[in-house]
Image: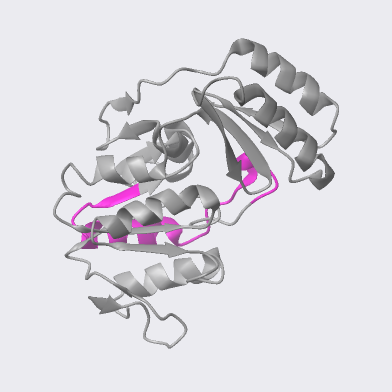
Amino acid sequence: MIGSSSSQEFRFQVPSLDQAAFLLDFDGTLVDIAPTPDSVVVPEGLPETLRRLRAACGDALAIVSGRSIDQIDHFLGDIPFAVAGEHGIAVRHRPGGPIERAALPSVPQSWFAEARDLIAAWPGARLEHKPGGFVLHYRAVPEAGAALRDAAENWVKGTNGTFEVQTAKMAWEVRPAGVDKGYAVSMLMKSLPFTGRKPVFVGDDVTDEDGMAAARRLGGVGLRIPTDFPNPTAFRAWLASLVEGKG
């Protein structure tokens, strides 16, 4: 194991780079949260840090996000070796490889129509479509949160657990149940170059807790912003120091 930082700011340890596999959340972890999903900015220096990290850990670098794989590709290109999107529903194990999708149902189309009408009643709220479901964003109109949550819970309550409401930061996601970031971590760790390594999962949200727990079960480390790092800026600085040999 190697220390997390040469300073005393961080109090945890992670496996050495030649033993570690890094599985990282995107929004709120690698990049700062933005008013809308499309307006996030990849900070200068982050791509190079991630490239160096991937080289240092033998390609065992994955992004595990609630976003679609296409969105992660848009922001990071071919930098990560593997990507898990939609909280694990979609997984691509290697660059250019096929996207494997869990065999799960999509939400009924009638829910989309009802969601559009609901969002229209709250100026500033946003409806984000995903392949298996949708997200109700209320960051710009916090007072809409309770009404949107109630509607989301009403949609799923009669489905016998087939669908669920996933809590996110200033958003509610309506999605198929049965797959989460813990599932994604388990799937990724079964294939090269991840297998045989100790997973280091880092996230910032309640949706990341399953990924953290899975990493710990597999003998690795689960870290969270702001518990282990105060913010994404601090996490990016820690990553940079790690690949520079200062961790």
Q: Is residue 214 magenta?
A: no
The location of residue 176, given as percent across then percent down, is 49, 26
Observer able to see residue 81: no
Front residue of this view, candidates 9 and 173? 173
Q: Residue at x 47, y 84 (%)?
A: 9
Quarter of the rendering occupied by the C terminus = bottom left
Q: Residue at x 74, y 46 (%)?
A: 139
202 to 78, vertically: above or below:
below
Observer able to see residue 229: yes
Q: Residue at x 46, y 71 (%)?
A: 237
Q: Is residue 49 magenta?
A: yes
The location of residue 156, given as percent across then percent down, is 60, 25
Residues in magenta? 34-62
Front residue of this view, candidates 240 and 141? 141
Residue 127 shown left or right of residue 203 in the figure: right
Q: How many numbered discs, if any?
A: 0
The quadrant in which residue 118 appears is top right
83 to 107, vertically: above or below:
below
